[in-house]
Image: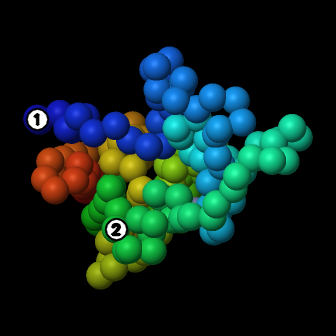
């Protein structure tokens, strides 16, 4: 199975390169705030909007959609999970498992989100802003249910979209 293409650095991941950080001298760093989710961009990555502004009163601020909200606005996604033939009695459990996994991912990284979960022609279809999130949700379902077969495929071009299919 081909590995996802990791050559492009994701903005949501902190960059640990000291040299890059030096570009922003003290007082030179601006903040970008997402008007939708209030995430804040600083030190080259997006953070939950819980940053403390004390001492930053003179920092230039601009408002711009974060990559996750931009993706949602453009109706794009990086991960898609399709759950087929879910037994009726497991449906509610599936939905809450997917939602919980989305919440946990968002807590860890403000850019990793469950975008939506819908029932389409008897299948559960969930979209995520991050491809590995789709894969990990599908694996969680597989781990919880022996009968569920999990197939994960990455579409390398044009962007690393992950399609994770779970079949009961
Ligand atoms: Zn946002």
Residue pointed to by mark 2: 76
Asked if residue 55 is positioned above or below residue 31 in the image, the reply reads above
Asked if residue 117 is positioned above or below residue 48 in the image, the reply reads below
- Crowd around label 1: few <14 · some 14–19 · many ≥20 (10 Å): few
State the quadrant of the C terminus: bottom left
Q: What's the residue at 54%, 23% (across, down)?
A: 22
Residue 81 screen position, x and y as percent: 33, 58
Q: Is residue 87 visible?
A: no
Residue pointed to by mark 1: 1
Q: Which of 50/126 is in front?
A: 50
Q: Which of 75/38 is in front?
A: 38
Q: Which of 38/150 is in front?
A: 38
- Crowd around label 2: few <14 · some 14–19 · many ≥20 (10 Å): some
Asked if residue 166 is positioned above or below residue 6 in the image, the reply reads below
Q: Which of 14/90 is in front?
A: 14
Q: Which secondary structure, mark 1?
A: loop
Considering every residue shown, the one lying at the far top of the view is 18
Q: What's the residue at 48%, 43% (across, down)?
A: 12
Q: Which secondary structure, mark 2?
A: loop
Q: What's the residue at 46%, 26% (across, down)?
A: 20
Residue 19 screen position, x and y as percent: 46, 19
Q: Looking at the image, in which quadrant does ligand 1 appear?
A: bottom right
């Amino acid at each position: 199975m081909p590995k996802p293409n990791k050559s492009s650095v994701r903005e949501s991941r902190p960059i640990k390169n000291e040299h890059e950080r030096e570009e922003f001298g003290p007082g030179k760093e601006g903040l970008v705030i997402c008007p939708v989710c209030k995430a804040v961009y600083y030190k080259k990555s997006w953070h939950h909007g819980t940053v403390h502004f004390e001492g930053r009163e003179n920092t230039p601020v601009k408002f711009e959609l974060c990559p996750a909200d931009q993706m949602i606005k453009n109706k794009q996604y990086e991960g898609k999970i399709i759950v087929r033939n879910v037994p009726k009695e497991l449906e509610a459990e599936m939905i809450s498992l997917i939602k919980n996994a989305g919440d946990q991912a968002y807590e860890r990284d403000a850019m990793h989100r469950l975008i939506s979960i819908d029932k389409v022609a008897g299948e559960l279809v969930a979209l995520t802003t991050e491809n590995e999130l789709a894969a990990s949700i599908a694996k969680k379902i597989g781990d919880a249910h022996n009968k569920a077969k999990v197939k994960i495929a990455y579409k390398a071009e044009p962007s690393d979209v992950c399609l994770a299919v779970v079949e009961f």
